[in-house]
Image (spheres, rainbow, N blue to C red):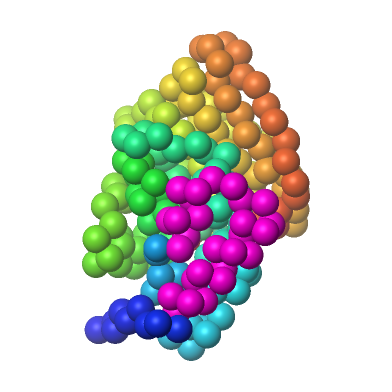
Amino acid sequence: MIKLEDSYSHKGQRKALVKTLARKGIMDKKVLEAIGTIPRHFFFDSALHSHAYEDKAFPIGEGQTISQPFTVAFQSELLAINAGDKVLEIGTGSGYQAAILYLLGAEVHTIEYNQHLYQRTKKFLPKLGIKAHFYQGDGSLGIPDKAPFDKIIVTAGAPVVPKSLLKQLKVGGILVIPVGDRKTQKMMKLTKKTAKQITQEEYDSFAFVPLLGHEGW
Ligand code: SAM
């Protein structure tokens, strides 16, 4: 049985984290508010609770990580979520990013490759009152029978932009994805202007765990 307690100290640390993210350039007030609301330590093993509000990625088991808060905030900002947006997240992991997307008003669809993380997070997020649709499988192929999506976020590093994901994006939709080699990737924002025209913006470098699967590594 997990004991979920959000103490005064945790709230204070969360406030400080939000200030750090704003100082590092996150401007979207709703994103900062969501980070300030979701207790990140709930997503950590209790042995690591004291590190939960550091702006760092941490292990979540199965060789995977919970992304750095700055990364979560940066990707969320690029997605520019509108209430009711149907959003696909690839790489459920701990469920922290999915929780932020939910708070931003998205209808969250999240897919995880790793069977154990899928099972764990599918059980855990509803306990926090977070609603999402959970899937297990190769998210590099998207989820064709749930498409199209308003927004797609990939939280693992891809070698190329998966064609399936662009296909499953609505016209006007946004795909945010880190693309590069197995160690570092550039954050990319792709906007589907028309069925045939995609614009592309490139941002700073990040270091994600690899996107596995058919259109991954
Ligand atoms: N979004 C997560 C969070 O908030 O904790 C962090 C994600 S972690 C950096 C990357 C996740 O992507 C891992 O859990 C990994 O198992 C998953 N992953 C890698 N390749 C995948 C694929 N093809 N489909 C779905 N998930 C994948």
Residue 187 spot, x, y in % from top left = 68, 43
Query: What residue is rendered at 53% in x and 12% in y?
Result: 194
Query: What residue is rendered at 69% in x and 57% in y?
Result: 24
Query: As rendered, which of 8 and 168 lies closer to the eye?
Result: 8
Residue 29 spot, x, y in % from top left = 50, 48
Question: Relative to residue 11, is residue 76 drawn left or right?
Answer: right
Would residue 84 be counted in the magenta stretch? no
Query: As rendered, which of 84 and 115 lies closer to the eye?
Result: 84
Query: What residue is rendered at 63% in x and 69% in y?
Result: 56
| Occupied quadrant, residue 43 | bottom left
Question: Relative to residue 46, is residue 161 drawn left or right?
Answer: right
The answer to whether residue 206 is seen in the rendering is: yes
| Residues drawn in magenta | 10-36
Furthest residue toward bottom: 47
Residue 159 spot, x, y in % from top left = 68, 42
Residue 103 spot, x, y in % from top left = 36, 51
| Occupied quadrant, residue 122 | bottom left
Question: Relative to residue 71, is residue 140 drawn left or right?
Answer: left
Query: What residue is rendered at 67% in x and 27% in y?
Result: 200
The answer to whether residue 214 is seen in the rendering is: no
In this rendering, is residue 90 above or below 94? above
In this rendering, is residue 174 above or below 18? above
Query: As rendered, which of 214 and 72 lies closer to the eye?
Result: 72
In this rendering, is residue 192 above or below 161? above
Q: Quadrant of the N terminus?
A: bottom left
Magenta span main SS? helix
Q: How many marks?
A: 0
Query: As rendered, which of 21 and 69 lies closer to the eye?
Result: 21
Would residue 32 be counted in the magenta stretch? yes
